[in-house]
Image (spheres, grey):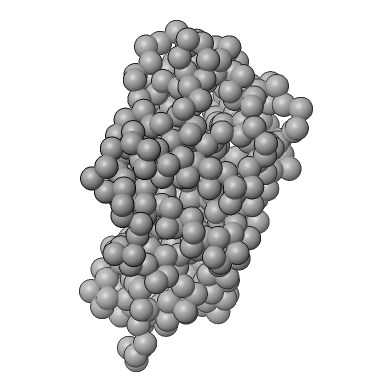
C-alpha cells in the first residue's frame, strides 16, 4: 500500500542541503543588502561570520577563520597551493572528492615524494600507514561514499607535518579534534543548510607559521593569496575578503549560526544528525534489501548516508525518480561517480520526523520497481 504520510520537507540533497527548520528568508538581517562588503556594516557582518564560527565551534586559542571564494573546493585548493611543498605529502583517497585532491597534488602541483593511500568505496584507508613526517591531506567525511573518519586517535600530537582536512560535510555534525587539525575547510551549504559559493578556511598556528615561512615556487592566483610582505594578511581572518562575497549569503550564514546555537551549539547539531542516522540504521536492520555502503559501522557517516540496494542500477534510478515524482524525496540518487544506490542527507537541518515519514516510502518504491 502506498503510504499516506509524506515528509513535510522532502529535501534530502547532500548539497545544497535542506534549510534549517522554520527558515524564512524574509526574517534575515537584510540591512547589509546593497551595501559594500568593505563598509563598516559589511565588515561587521563578515567579521561575525569568522568570530561566531570560532566561538560556536570552540576553536582553540590562536586558530584563525576566514571566508574565502569558491566554496569548500576553493578553501582546500587555497590551502594546498599555499602550504604544500616543503615536505613530502601523504594524501588519503577513498571517494571522488579525495580523488580530486590527489589529482591536484600529483598532476597539477606535481609534488615529489607524494604517497597516495587508496581505498575503494565503502572502505577507508589504513591509518597505520600514514607518515606524519609528511604533510597529510584527507577528507573527514567522504560525502560521496558515506564513509567518515571515526576519530582523531590516529593523528599524533607531535606530528612533524601539517594535517589538511577537507571537512565540508562533517563540521557541525561530527566531533572534530581541532588540536590535531592544522587546516580545516568546509562550506555553508552543508550541515548548516547555508548557501553555496563561499568557503570557510580554518588555520592553526602551525599552519600560519608554515604560510609565513614558505614561498611556493609556482605562480599564486590572487584568490589564493593569504599573505603580504611575507606575513599573513590578518584582515582576511577578520572579514576582509579577497573578492566580493554575496552579502545575502552572509546574512543567511549568520542566521544558520544563530539557529545552531539555539539547538545547543555543536553538541546539539551533532545530536540531531546522529538521531537522523539512527532512523535509517533501524530501517536497514529491519530490511535485508537495503544496507550501508560503509562496511564498518564505526566509519558510517551520519550526514551523507549512502545506501546499497538489491536492485539493478536502472531499478535504483527508477526508484529515486519515483520518490521524486511522488514529492517525498528529492535528489537522493547516489553521486555520479559512486556505486549505484541512494544517498540521503541526515545533517542537522533535516527533521527526524521527515526521515521517519520517508522510510515507508522507500519500501513502497522498492516494491514498485522490482515488480
Please identify the quarter of the rendering in which residue 269 is found. Answer: bottom right
Q: Name the residue rendered at 27%, 76% in the picture.
A: 327
Q: Is residue 36 left or right of residue 231?
A: left
Judged from this view, the residue extending furthest toward the front is 40
Q: Position of residue 256 (x, y in %)?
A: 44, 57
- 347, above or below 227, in the image: below
Q: Name the residue rendered at 45%, 14% in the picture.
A: 228
- 272, above or below 254, in the image: below
Q: Name the residue rendered at 61%, 19% in the picture.
A: 209
Q: Quadrant of the C terminus?
A: bottom left
Q: Name the residue rendered at 31%, 52% in the picture.
A: 31
> Can residue 141 be seen in this snapshot?
no
Q: Position of residue 105 (x, y in %)?
A: 46, 23
Q: Position of residue 24 (x, y in %)?
A: 33, 67
Q: Is residue 59 left or right of residue 29?
A: right
Marks counted in the figure total 0
Q: Is residue 338 left or right of residue 115?
A: left
> Can residue 179 be seen in this snapshot?
yes
Q: Quadrant of the N terminus?
A: bottom left
Q: Position of residue 25 (x, y in %)?
A: 30, 63
**Which is nearer the eye, 150 or 113?**
150
- 363, above or below 300, in the image: below
Please identify the quarter of the rendering in which residue 357 is found. Answer: bottom left
Amino acid at each position: 500500500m502506498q503510504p499516506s504520510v509524506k515528509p513535510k520537507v522532502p529535501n534530502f540533497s547532500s548539497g545544497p542541503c535542506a534549510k534549517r527548520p522554520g527558515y524564512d528568508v524574509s526574517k534575515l538581517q537584510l540591512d547589509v543588502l546593497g551595501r559594500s562588503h568593505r563598509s563598516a556594516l559589511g565588515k561587521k557582518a563578515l567579521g561575525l561570520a569568522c568570530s561566531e564560527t570560532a566561538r560556536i565551534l570552540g576553536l582553540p586559542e590562536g586558530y584563525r577563520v576566514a571566508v574565502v571564494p569558491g566554496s569548500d573546493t576553493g578553501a582546500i585548493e587555497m590551502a594546498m597551493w599555499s602550504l604544500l611543498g616543503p615536505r613530502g605529502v601523504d594524501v588519503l583517497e577513498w571517494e571522488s572528492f579525495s580523488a580530486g585532491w590527489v589529482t591536484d597534488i600529483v598532476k597539477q602541483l606535481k609534488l615529489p615524494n607524494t604517497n597516495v593511500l587508496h581505498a575503494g568505496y565503502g572502505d577507508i584507508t589504513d591509518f597505520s600507514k600514514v607518515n606524519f613526517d609528511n604533510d597529510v591531506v584527507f577528507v573527514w567525511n567522504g560525502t560521496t561514499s558515506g564513509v567518515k573518519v571515526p576519530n582523531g586517535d590516529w593523528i599524533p600530537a607531535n606530528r612533524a607535518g601539517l594535517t589538511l582536512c577537507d571537512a565540508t560535510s562533517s563540521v557541525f555534525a561530527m566531533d572534530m579534534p581541532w588540536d590535531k587539525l592544522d587546516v580545516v575547510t568546509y562550506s555553508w551549504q552543508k550541515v548548516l543548510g547555508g548557501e553555496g559559493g563561499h568557503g570557510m578556511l580554518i588555520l592553526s598556528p602551525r599552519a600560519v607559521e608554515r604560510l609565513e615561512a614558505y614561498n611556493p615556487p609556482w605562480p599564486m592566483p590572487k584568490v589564493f593569496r593569504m599573505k603580504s610582505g611575507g606575513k599573513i594578511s590578518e584582515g582576511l581572518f577578520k572579514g576582509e575578503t579577497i573578492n566580493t562575497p554575496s552579502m545575502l549569503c552572509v546574512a543567511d550564514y549568520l542566521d544558520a549560526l544563530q539557529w545552531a546555537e539555539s539547538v545547543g551549539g555543536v553538541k546539539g547539531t551533532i545530536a540531531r544528525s546522529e538521531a537522523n542516522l539512527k532512523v535509517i540504521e533501524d530501517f536497514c536492520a529491519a530490511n535485508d534489501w537495503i544496507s550501508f555502503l560503509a562496511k564498518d559501522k564505526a566509519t558510517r557517516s551520519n550526514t551523507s548516508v549512502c545506501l546499497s540496494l538489491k536492485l539493478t542500477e536502472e531499478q535504483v534510478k527508477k526508484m529515486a525518480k519515483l520518490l521524486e515524482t511522488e514529492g517525498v524525496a528529492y535528489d537522493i540518487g547516489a553521486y555520479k561517480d559512486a556505486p549505484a544506490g541512494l544517498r540521503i542527507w541526515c545533517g542537522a537541518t533535516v527533521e527526524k520526523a521527515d526521515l521517519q515519514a520517508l522510510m515507508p516510502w522507500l519500501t513502497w518504491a522498492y516494491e514498485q520497481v522490482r515488480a
